[in-house]
Amino acid sequence: MTMERRNFLKLLGAGAAATASVGLAGYANAASSAGGGRKVVVIGGGYGGTIAARYIRMMDSSIEVTLIERNDHYVSCPFSNLYLGGILPDLSLLTIKYDKLASNHGIKVVQAEVTGIDAENHSVTTSNGVFKYDRLVVSPGVEFRTDEIAGYDPEIMPHAWKAGPQTVLLRKQLEAMKPGGTVVLSIPLAPFRCPPGPYERTSMIAMYLKQHKPGSKIIVLDANPDIVSKKGLFLKGWKKHYEGIIDYRPAKKVTEVDNKNMSVLIEGIDEVKGDVINIIPPQKAGHIAHVAGLVGADKKWCPVDPTTFESTLHKDIHVIGDSSIAGAMPKSGYSANSEAKVCAANIVALMSGRETTDMSGVNTCYSFLSEKEAVSVTGVYQVDKEKNAIVAVAGSVGVSPDLSELEAVYAQSWVKNILNEMSS
Amino acid sequence: MRRKWSGMALALGALVMSAVAHAAPPSAEMLSNACGGCHGANGASAGPSMPSLAGQNKDFFIDAMKKFKSGERPGTVMSRLAKGYSDEQVVAMAEFFATQKPKAQDATVDRTKIAKGKSVYNSACKRCHLENGKEFEEDTPVVAGQWLRYLQIQMAEFQSGARKMSEKKAEKVKSLTAADWDAVAHYYASQK
């Protein structure tokens, strides 16, 4: 860009600022029920929502931020496979609370179930009152498409794909299983939350079986034609550690379950029996995104602007994390964290009448193969202006060259840091 | 001149319609925030093996990213992530982190090793890692208060030869034992 053009843009930015602030002032009056302050409401206290709330307050403490979450705590899905494998004794290290977000950053934390969003009137209806907003951030994670698996009952065949009681249930089932038993793990068609997650889970369950349940095996029924993420590394780790324990079967889509016989049906025909059955159902955007009309033509995920994460369907509502269609960024905890910061920066810019900033995002996902070895996939992301979509920066996307003990050390610091950032 | 002004008026209209298409390039803050998922908000790491970037020497940061990119410095995820940024973006991030408030690590350090580390530091390290590691010279890092586990990993890489040293450093540390290196790590980590 030439100097001339740069100055030119600066000048334009100033013009836009004046126009935008007039518009916003009008809005604030219409939207705020009490007081004239600018208000952001964030729905969902997970990897995306906590960070969006925190960073908006860090960047502009004059904006009032309310974080609405149905639970009083959050359990991280990343690393919960290590609990299933027995590396973590419980889920306490993966559990965060919201008190410090309130005390350190002045975020209003409300424990409530969101029942509706009125995009026109800029309000959110909850089990604990109505909240007005100037801008809304929706970060509800995923919901399961359970209607695609006939007979599905998570109390009998847990998904454990939202960490917490479901994870504990699956762990208890594994502990209660007799030696020589069979675990069945069903993986849905992509895209789903955490692309390498099911294969890490396979590794962790196989490790548990090897150590505690001699003669047992795990049958992996993958609806996808092949391993979705880090294929070479998972195959290498499975051969090194779990030969004869993992029976991986691609292109096997589970469509029905029989809870009495403890079996699953592939495409309604082939029956596979298991002593413990872990069904990870196919997924879609969180429930509230559907209720609020934020879901696109695919009826699954939410289309957003790649720079601001503002919904392309409803003005002043931003969708981040697993629910959003974020181009090349995978549905991961790190992506949600990174998207939240991009969204926060541009929400503050828009609410202050400043020019928005192009997104720059990062993803890093670690997966454990054994007690001491982990692998990772990384990426740096930016906006492709021609495509108006998020794309990976060439050269930044790649996986570990090999199984790595050092990466397992760094992975443990990753989870500590990212959960700390969400809760301090 | 007149033509230019009319062009600007048109462009201004377009910008108001769609701020997104005319968004500014990623700011230093936008670029750096993305690092926080591992390195902590504003580069203040919660540890124990993830280094803090807050308050780091700008030139060291630039040099480290360059070496991760080229493969000269061994790395895990950083060998790949560094390739995602232009030289200008790396400089912007270096400047951002250099101005953030440093945060001292709080992992447990060994008092006996600190005392030994101080004497090793005085004999071998202090001419480049100034002021007990709080200050720097050219492209040396700020090491005072850095996370112990991270320092130990780096020192192991220097000893094994995986991470290359400058000739000056190699000469200074050639007589150090593994215990000396470890003691210096404890000493640096103990500095506030």
Image (tube, coloured by chain):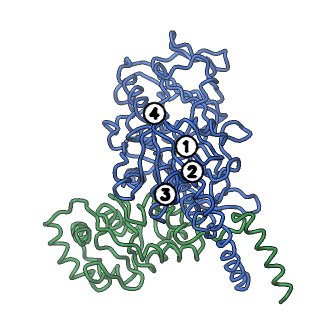
Image point (57%, 45%), residue name:
A123
Residue A233 rendering spot, x and y as whole percentages = 53, 45
Q: Circle 4 — which element?
A: loop
- The residue singled out by tag 4 in the image is A242
Residue A90 rendering spot, x and y as whole percentages = 32, 36
Residue A184 rendering spot, x and y as whole percentages = 51, 23
CA gap between label 2 and label 1 equals 9 Å
- The residue singled out by tag 1 in the image is A124
Say whether marks 4 and 1 touch (CB < 8 Å). Answer: no
Say whether marks 2 and 1 touch (CB < 8 Å). Answer: yes
Which chain is painted in blue? A
Q: Is residue A387 left or right of residue A18?
A: right
CA gap between label 3 and label 4 equals 62 Å
The chain identifier of the residue carrying mark 3 reads A
The tag earlier along the polypeptide, 3 or 1, is 3
Residue B157 rendering spot, x and y as whole percentages = 37, 65
Q: Is A366 located above or below residue B161 in the figure?
A: above
Say whether marks 3 and 2 touch (CB < 8 Å). Answer: no
Q: Name which quarter of the figure residue B121 lies in.
A: bottom left
What mark, if any, has residue A35 been given in the picture?
3
The chain identifier of the residue carrying mark 2 reads A
